[in-house]
Amino acid sequence: MNNPREIALELLSDFGLSDLRSTDILDVISALDIPLKFKSLTGCDGRIIHGDNKSLIVINENIEFDTRIKFTVAHELGHYLMHRDSPIIHSDNISSMSWFNNKNKELIAQQEYEANTFASELLLPTEIFKKEIQGIKFSPHLMKQLASKFGVSLSSMIYRFVEFGNQPICAFYCRKNIVNYWKKSPLFTYQIKEVTKLSPPDDSVAAEYFEDGTIYIKEEAIQEITKSVWLVKRNKSDYAGADDFENDKFYEYCMVYSAVDLAISVIWED
């Protein structure tokens, strides 16, 4: 099995870089002499085709956002460096690249997980991320600041916080009114309700979007919710202490991508 983080850091080291803030990833592709072209693609953002002697990376020329282009290129570069000996042709879209659902351990799912992990480490190395958030609480504002600073998407930045943040949070990936999967940080000790493959809970912010198109912005983007919306209440006998589901403050922030009917909800405690 590949070690995507190590491979990404080795590549940065080879170029004498600590991260890619000052370097265009397309220049890295060019320096590695990897053929890449932009063309119109249907149903995917990027594709890599492995030939006998060369691999070709193709990026959809219709992608709107620079951050998405950057992540797509980094993702396909991960495939190039780690999976050139594989016969699989990868056609990648928002489902395979936005978040890392690694529950399916089949070969293609494992390779997507590795390519995503490589791209995240290349664009924002873990140790640099940890230094950036040291002593700072989670907030959507902080995530937006860091996303802008490193030129990555907000969803990618939040995923980094789920993985390596200093505060318990949990994120839910919902598409077409279905919770596809969720991921919580190691510090998040609450039990999640059985929501996978179901519609988001009725009182959630995500449900508001899918039911009537509600999108909260600016000061209202952070909505206070009760713990019982997403979480299972535990009995006092189950652990030391008791959850106060009535008075403890919990929050939900929902990122909406209406073009693909996608909502990513993040919950955390005050």
Image: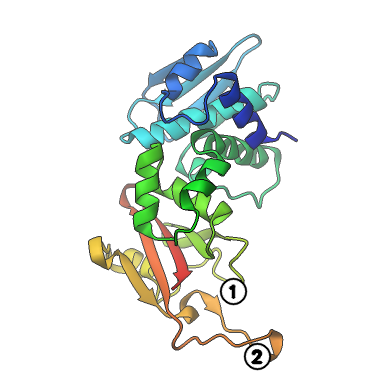
Residue at 52% from the left image edge and 41% from the top image edge:
128
Residue at 66% from the left image edge and 52% from the top image edge:
103
Q: In the rendered image, which quarter contains the N terminus?
A: top right
Residue 97 vertical placement versus 255 (above, below): above
Q: Where in the figure is residue 242, as x and y percent of width and height? A: 59, 88
Spatial CA span between label 2 and label 1: 13 Å
Q: Residues within 10 Å of mark 1 (few under 14, many from 20)?
A: some
Q: Is residue 18 left or right of residue 265?
A: right
Q: Earlier in the sequence, mark 2 or mark 1?
A: 1
Instruction: Using the rendered view, name the quadrant where residue 210 is placed.
Output: bottom left
Identify which residue, 203 or 66, lies in the foreground: 66
Which label was assigned to residue 236?
Answer: 2
Q: Residues within 10 Å of mark 2 (few under 14, many from 20)?
A: few
Instruction: Using the rendered view, name the quadrant where residue 66 is placed.
Output: top left
Which label was assigned to residue 190?
Answer: 1
| Disc 2, SS | helix
Disc 2 residue type (three-letter) = Lys
Disc 1 residue type (three-letter) = Tyr
